[in-house]
Amino acid sequence: MSSKSIAHSDKIDSILKRFSEVGDAMAQGPSGDEFVRLSKEYAELEPVAETARQLRATLAEAEDLKGMTDDPEMGEMAREELAELEERIPRLENRLRMLLLPRDEADDRSVILEVRAGTGGDEAALFAGDLLRMYQRYAQSRGWKLEILSASESERGGYKEIVAAIKGAGAFARLKFESGVHRVQRVPETEAQGRIHTSAATVAVLPEAEDVDIQIDEKDLRIDVFRASGPGGQSVNTTDSAVRITHLPTGIVVSQQDEKSQHKNKAKAMKVLRARLYEMERRKQMEERSEQRRGQIGSGDRSERIRTYNFPQGRVTDHRINLTLYKLPQIMEGEGLDELIEALITEDQAARLAAQDDDGGR
């Protein structure tokens, strides 16, 4: 599709018309809820509308200049200005095409982060703890709030499993490609021979679901209460405050024991259950729409090996996009994670644009 056809397509005409209608409606001073709804729609339409207007204006100006290139007096200046515009047009066109890509409705949401030790015993549990700290520091750098929902600590440090909520606008958009198996290669402190061991941890990133997203029928739940226990199985509570919720239709089980209150543990467990059910429904819809999203980066499958952290060489390799960065300390501190995330987002956008082109722009 040429830049001219994109700028003057029926889709852009419709967006510009709607953008004008929403602006007019906001100027009428609507009531609270209606104003919030209109403001949100206006904010979503504005980047597309402004870019389309810039592209249309630039194309029109280029057409005018083409008619002046042979003018004895103005020709040289017209050719110089035309060359500048012809450099600008592809950039505007590409930006508009990016803005027209279907948005993941969950991108603006907060997330539920689950990290589980995989193969590798104690070393895997320590690595799970390292990953959690990496995400904690990354969340802090972006002004997000991380709250631990449940944790099963390993006796030698780290975690067998930990679940956290990360609150912040756009958290899912930036963290959704973290789902999968993270592998670590390093020499454990207990290794006398200096041999490199390989272990792994599994990460799942789920968009946080609201009550309105997922309706859960109480009759579909089996709720068991039990006494909370710490590492090694010792009791850490004298009351049956821990909660295990089983969603009978899907078989999903969520346990929560970190709070002393049974009510608080149930509320946290329901938050995680709701996120898992919401993610299950999202994936089902995506598969129906695009046969497992062939054009996107990774499937988000928890069994997919996505990244290797090699400590002796100080490198991190993301296997989905064949990107290796020799910045392991910065990445583990959270500050270097953005470079990986930006590369994944860029590659995903490029793949989706290519898939859109293959479909004839439908």
Image (cartoon, grey):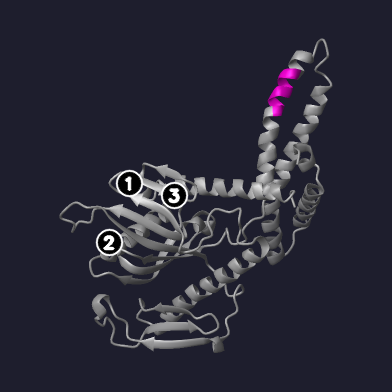
In whole angstroms, how far apart are the C-alphas of marks 1 and 2?
A: 18 Å
Task: Kindly report which numbered mark, 1 or 2, lies closer to the viewer in this rendering.
Answer: 2
Q: Amino acid at mark 3?
A: Asp
- The residue singled out by tag 3 in the image is 318
Residue at the spot x=35%, y=45% of the render? Answer: 315
In whole angstroms, how far apart are the C-alphas of marks 2 and 3?
A: 21 Å
Whether pointer 3 and pointer 1 mark residues with C-beta atoms closer than 8 Å, the reply is no
- The residue singled out by tag 1 in the image is 329
Residue 7 higher or lower than 294, as above or below: above
Reading the chain from its start, which is encountered first: label 3 or label 1?
3
Q: Kindly tell me whether residue 169 is visible in this rendering.
A: no
Q: How many marks?
A: 3
Reading the chain from its start, which is encountered first: label 2 or label 3?
2
Q: Kindly tell me whether residue 284 is visible in this rendering.
A: yes
Residue 312 higher or lower than 29, as above or below: above
- Classify mark 3: helix, strand or loop: strand
Q: x, y percentage for residue 151?
A: 35, 71
Q: x, y percentage for residue 118?
A: 35, 65
Instruction: Determine the image quadrant of residue 303.
Output: bottom left
Instruction: Determine the image quadrant of residue 157.
Output: bottom left
Residue at the spot x=72%, y=51% of the render? Answer: 359
- The residue singled out by tag 2 in the image is 123
Relative horizontal placement of residue 281, taking residue 16 as reference (left or right): left
Reading the chain from its start, which is encountered first: label 1 or label 2?
2
Q: Amino acid at mark 2?
A: Glu
Task: Kindly report which numbered mark, 3 or 1, lies closer to the viewer in this rendering.
Answer: 3
Give 294 or 215, whichever is nearer the viewer. 294
Residue farthest left in this picture: 192
Q: What range of the chain is rendered magenta?
A: 79-86
In whole angstroms, how far apart are the C-alphas of marks 3 and 1?
A: 16 Å
Instruction: Determine the image quadrant of residue 6.
Output: top right
